[in-house]
Amino acid sequence: MPYYLMDEWEHSGRDDSDWYAVVYCSEEDTLQRYEIGSTRYANALPCNPPRIHRQIDGEWTEFVLEKPSEEILVKARACLVRDYLIGMIQKSEQDKIFRLKPERVGAGKKVVFTEDHKNQVKTCQTKPCEKCQGGYWINPRNSEDKRPCFTCKGAGVIKFDFQKAKVNDKVVWKKIALGTKAEIVSLRSYGKFYKSGYNQPNEHNTTALVRLEDGSEAFVPLSKLRLAEEMPTEEKIKKKAEAIASQGGAFYIPFATASMRF
């Protein structure tokens, strides 16, 4: 059973170094990672050519890794795309669209509600924002340079004196249905956050102020929103995976990233 060396690398730890290889088995049509050497054990430095050990029928057998031909390279890249990269890209796109991170989204992002939500209806008074011109700051040196006002967040008006709307002394609630489209106005995360702390702003501790299509605004947890984008088609994902697999001919970075093995 032939095994081919597709790529190899060294992982230098604090006290020891380990050497790994991406190995392609043509009979099984699989890519796997093997440790081919380490300073953690006696007489375990990498051999030349590298070798791996596999347990077959209850016995450990040594295999010398062969250099791949062009035909094997094509098959190994196809395996990398099929078994690793396509799944990695799909997961990445799903996280990007369905798991919103505060650092990735901001004012102006178009979003969609992923579940039903209800908000207390509040009344308020308004006055024109004195810090901007209709919701935007305009660069005095470049009239085309327009940016949302920091004070009114692009609304053009300042809202104040908020009061809960009541009917017959009962608070009025507005129901927002799944699939409703909106635009993010601002974000606010709640909790104590430290630069190196485990607790960081995320979709579960962040509330978004969104503007609905009818002009009303509502507060909603970021976890109930997704981007107003569609998943790429399977064809686009496959083309992207093939482009990654063919870059420079190296297998380490795409394989390690896709398999989460470093």
Image (cartoon, rainbow, N blue to C red):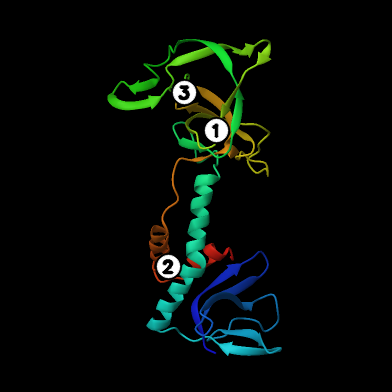
Q: Image point 62% across, 72% down: which residue?
A: 18
Disc with the residue nearer the chain's start (1 vs 2): 1
Residue kind at label 3, given as amino acid type: Lys
The reply to whether the C-beta atoms of the residues labelled 3 and 1 are less than 8 Å apart is no
Residue at which label 1 appears: 177
- Helix, strand or loop at label 2? It is helix
Disc 1 from disc 2: Cα separation: 42 Å
Sequence-wise, the earlier of marks 3 and 1 is 3
Q: Residue at x 68, y 14 (%)?
A: 170
Badge 3 marks a residue whose secondary structure is loop
User: Marks 3 and 1, Cα distance to the nearest angstrom?
Assistant: 25 Å
Q: Quadrant of residue 42?
A: bottom right
Q: Amino acid at mark 1?
A: Ala
Q: Is residue 22 visible in the rendered structure shown here?
A: no
Residue 31 visible in the displayed image: yes
Tags 1 and 2 touching, CB below 8 Å: no
- Left or right: residue 191 versus residue 209 is right
If you read the primary sequence from the N terminus, does the residue marked by circle 3 or circle 2 appear first? 3
Task: Report helix, strand or loop for mark 1.
Answer: loop
Name the one closer to the observer, 117 or 126.
117
Q: Which residue is mark 3?
A: 153
Q: Is residue 129 above or below residue 245?
A: above
The residue at the point 43 percent across, 82 percent down is 72
Query: CA gap, disc 3 to disc 2?
Result: 43 Å
Three-letter residue code for mark 2: Ala
Name the mark on residue 245: 2
